[in-house]
Amino acid sequence: MGGSLWSAGMGAMVAYFMFIFMNGNPTQHVDKLFKMMSQGMAGKESVAAFDKVYTSVDGNTQHNAYDGDVARSFYNLATEFYEYGWGDSFHFGVRTRSEPHSKCIANSQNFVATKLRVGNFDKVLDMGCGIGGPLRGVVRATGANVTGLSINEHQIMRGKEITAGLSPWMQERCHFMVQDYLAVKGLEENSYDAAFYMESSLHCEDRTKTFKEAFRLLKPGGRLVAMEYYLLPGWEPNNPEHKELMRRHLYGNGAAKTPTIEDGLKQITDAGFVIQEHFDLMAELEKVFGVDAWPWWADLQFNWAPDLLPAHPWIRTPLPHLLRVLSKIGLVPPDVPAAAELMNEGGDGLSGLGKVGAITPQYYVGAIKPL
């Protein structure tokens, strides 16, 4: 019985990887899945321990731990799955149906770079930088000197590793630090020209705390560009389907309670900023592309033209089951299939909310620190 189970599991995995290698997107790193299968999760993070934080979450309610600790743990579980399934830029975007995934990533990064209004060697903060995909995109577009902050040591190590393989011009302008963006230490106040958040404040319930840190570090007149997760008018808090999608999103993305647009904007002004403009970038880009628009959530939902195969339900839904078979016979650490299931919870919940018009991951807010 054990031999036949092993053979079936290995056969399924071989077929799975052959399909990905033949059809995968070049922005993805299938090798990251192999690494997790052999070494386990970064920092030996436990999914069971992470799960306890979200046991009381029901709909759009808050978990029971410190936001920074939750983000640190979550990205030990998620970072390599994100690289495997999405690429090095952990954010969404809108493109046309005929364009590759890389185009929607570029659309959002170029938008941020334009709104920052910075130039060569201007000092910029990336507040919640992940492994540096948006940071490097902003540097390429502007020449700015960007410092990325993340609470997760594995992400900072990976950001430095990727940047070390780039040109001296890029290396001179890309920097990374392990920092809690709710309490930044050791950086000079009133010294940065601009700061941006690329979907990164979703891990904070009281976002005013991190916006106050950005405010403190910016020069008078410095610019804030925040791409925010906000609830949209389509959100129905008493709708059981919406509540379950939200629960899955918060849990599967390590997120805090999601604010309304009104509450979110107040969190920014309460930090001292003056808002100059704000709108839902995802909705605006869908208007620009019209009937040819590929919505930000579409790659995670079933579709007949998959560009991101490991993110497509055809591929990601069976993955935890295949990994669980290999785990039972001792070939894969047990937290790997559990983490794969966690990623599916986040993907299904968030994309489901997007499909019903309940949430946006990129509500743009442009603000300044007064002179």
Image: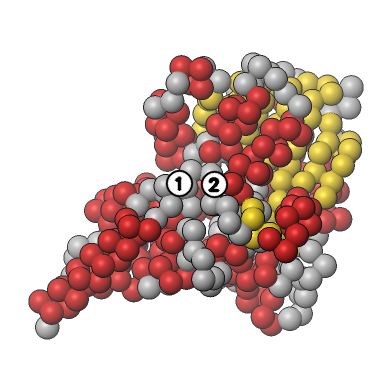
Q: Earlier in the sequence, mark 2 or mark 1?
A: 1
Quadrant of residue 60 within the rendered picture: bottom right
Q: In this rendering, does residue 52 appear at all?
A: no
Total number of numbered labels?
A: 2
Residue at 74 percent of width and 68 percent of height: 357
Quadrant of residue 232 within the rendered picture: bottom right
Quick check: 3 left or right of 21? Answer: left
Dot 1 falls on a residue whose secondary structure is loop
Instruction: For marks 2 and 1, give the CA distance.
Output: 7 Å
Residue at 40 percent of width and 68 percent of height: 315
Dot 2 falls on a residue whose secondary structure is helix
Q: Is residue 99 above or below residue 115?
A: below
Estimate the x, y position of residue 323 in percent, counting from the top left.
Answer: 30, 67
Three-letter code for the amino acid on which mark 2 is drawn: Ser
In the drawing, what numbered circle is on residue 102? 2
Estimate the x, y position of residue 105 in percent, counting from the top left.
Answer: 59, 46
The residue that mark 1 highlights is: 27
Quadrant of residue 153 within the rendered picture: top left
State the residue in front, 162 or 71.
162
Quick check: 296 left or right of 100? Answer: right
Question: Which image quadrant: the C terminus?
Answer: top right
State the residue in front, 14 or 91.
14
